[in-house]
Image (tube, rainbow, N blue to C red):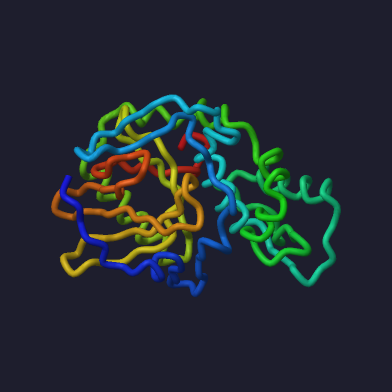
Amino acid sequence: MRFVPALITAASLLACSVASGSEFQLARDTFAFSNDTVFAYGVDETGLLKIRFREKPADFSHRCFVLSEAVLQFRKYARFAPEQPRVTREEYGRLIRRIRGIPLWRRGPQAPIVVPGYRDLGSFSEAYEGLFKENLGHWLPSYLRVGNWRMLMGHPRAGQAAAAQWLRDSLAQGQPRAVYLARFPHMNHVVVVYGVHTKPNGDLRFAVYDPNSPRTAHWLDYRQDQRSFDFEKRWYFPGGRVNVMRLFLSPFH
């Protein structure tokens, strides 16, 4: 796959403003820790993906669904109040579980759930990494989701064009979205799309939060002429075409 040069600076990927005026920032609005892959990956000089067993098992893995969903849940349902006194570890755990217990397709409580003592999700998760890992939830339910079967099915180009337009419309309304990236059997991953830039040729470059690599800007391109998405080369993926599926819109997505 031919590499497409980046047309957005790292700074503009790290913080993308959307039409509503709400700005998504990686260091502020995502977790300070990462999802770890079960296997060790590498891409050789020919572009082939190499997979091997880790010498030491990963401590926190299979959680790309969990972290992506939780980032959006905290954005939608929580309000951070750094001016308020901090509470006990047990109370913070209760707040995490409460926020995680509200599906993204629901409206949620009338008032945001207040998280006292911290300015944002980044600083909160940095201070309480262990607590988050204990309370975000097990990975198994994400593997048993009804919508996962789509990974094995065909992906018509019209559907990919519709997904690109859905992402663009959502971001124009100030709403980051989680998407399922699949290229069976080499790609099975979830990221959060939080910004978009239109290239001179009309293609779209989406800025994404990758749970495998927090605090680092990454991109997902939509190529209009082929009505397809390309995900950038990563240490666990050689780069190239992926199929994009919408997530967390109902119990069946």
Q: Quadrant of residue 17?
A: bottom left
* x then y, percent, for residue 244: 33, 43
In the picture, residue 120 is in which quadrant?
bottom right
Tell me if residue 207 comes above or below residue 130 in the rendering: below
Residue at 77%, 64% in the rendered image: 117
Picture coordinates of residue 75, whole percent (x, y):
59, 58
Please give the name of the residue rendered at 43% of the width and 68% of the height, measured from the top-left corner. 16
On the rendered structure, is 24 left or right of 195? right
Q: Is residue 85 left or right of residue 235?
A: right
Q: Residue furthest front?
A: 55
Please provide percent x and percent y for residue 79.
69, 63
Q: Could you tell me which residue is drawn at 39 percent across and 70 percent down?
A: 12
Instruction: Indicate the quadrant containing the N terminus: top left, top right, bottom left or bottom right.
Output: top left
User: What residue sits 25% from the left and 54% below the top?
Assistant: 222
Q: What is the residue that sits farthest to the left in this orientation?
A: 225
Left/right placement of residue 182 relative to residue 250 reads: left
Q: Position of residue 161 (x, y in %)?
A: 25, 50
Question: Closer to the camera, 60 or 225?
Answer: 60
Q: Which residue is more in the foreground, 155 or 182?
A: 182
- Label tally: 0
Q: Quadrant of residue 172?
A: bottom left
